[in-house]
Image (cartoon, rainbow, N blue to C red):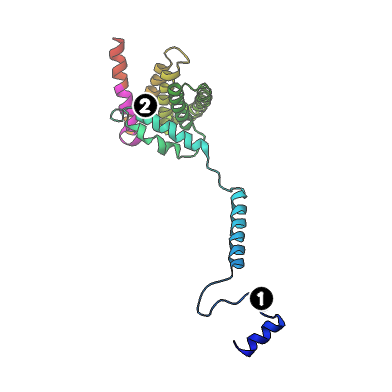
Amino acid sequence: MSDVVRENLANGNVGKASLSKPAPPPQGTNETPARNSFSGSQDFENRLRQASSAPMTYQPERGSLFQQLYVAHFIASGDLRIHSWLAELPNILARPVGNEEIFAIRAATMALYSKVTQNRELQAEALKWYSKGLEAQRMKLSLASQKGSVGTCSRGAIGAAILFSYFECIMCTMPMGHLQHYAAAAEIVEVAGPETCQSGLMHMFFRSLRISSVRLYLFRY
């Protein structure tokens, strides 16, 4: 035992340095005191808690998600070989809101899904969109007839009339209502003329109306 150690033992100084100040980590290592690591983890937990409790600025729109569900179910329930326009419904919905075609899509798709699920609230909502669609169609056709330009709004009017016919087949709000809408769609096609039904959605609507008209004729006779 060295003289320095004996002197420290005699004076009672051994261990005081280690108790008053922690020994530094050995050189060449990356170790840090436990107190610092605990403090860092606590700060991280505090930040995480604040982030989780902060209000979210993005809220997904539930209405559009449900509308996609109704449209997908409506398309899957139809025959795309005959009514090829069904596949175009999502593209029509992507256009600006406020015309009779949009209202008719909402009414028909909600009506079908509400019948399958027996959802009375959804049935009432479908009836609201049906009423809005009929009013929008009347106003649009009235203005077009006054200006002599029914052909310019024929595509939207025909699509809405066909979808209104689907709605009446499902909900049956008036006797033979679906036939009246089909007859209205056929009249608009006649006014629009054959040159407007050679391509695009107008051609799809024309084919659908023609096949349905033949079926209705055979059913009546």
Locate residue 151, reporting x and y percent: 41, 31
Would residue 200 be counted in the magenta stretch? yes
Quarter-wise, where is residue 16 in the image? bottom right
Mark 2 to mark 1 CA distance (whole Å): 95 Å
Task: Using the image, determine if residue 5 lies above or below residue 135.
Answer: below
Q: Is residue 202 left or right of residue 97?
A: left
Magenta residue span: 196-211
Q: Residue furthest top?
A: 221
* Residue type at the position of mark 2: Val
Find numbered disc 2 in the image and state the secondary structure of the residue it sits on: helix
Dot 2 corresponds to which residue? Answer: 189
Dominant secondary structure, magenta: helix
Locate residue 140, reporting x and y percent: 50, 29
Residue located at (68% from left, 75% from top): 20
Q: Is residue 215 left or right of residue 103?
A: left
In the picture, the quarter occupied by the N terminus is bottom right
Residue located at (63% from left, 74% from top): 22
* Residue type at the position of mark 1: Lys
Q: Residues within 10 Å of mark 2 (few under 14, many from 20)?
A: many
- N-terminal-most mark, 2 or 1: 1
Circles 2 and 1: CB atoms closer than 8 Å: no
Dot 1 corresponds to which residue? Answer: 21
Locate residue 101, reporting x and y percent: 45, 31
Q: Which sits in the foreground, 76 or 188?
A: 76
In the picture, the quarter occupied by the C terminus is top left
Q: Which sits in the foreground, 139 or 204?
A: 204
Q: Is residue 217 left or right of residue 68?
A: left
Task: Using the image, determine if residue 156 lies above or below residue 4.
Answer: above
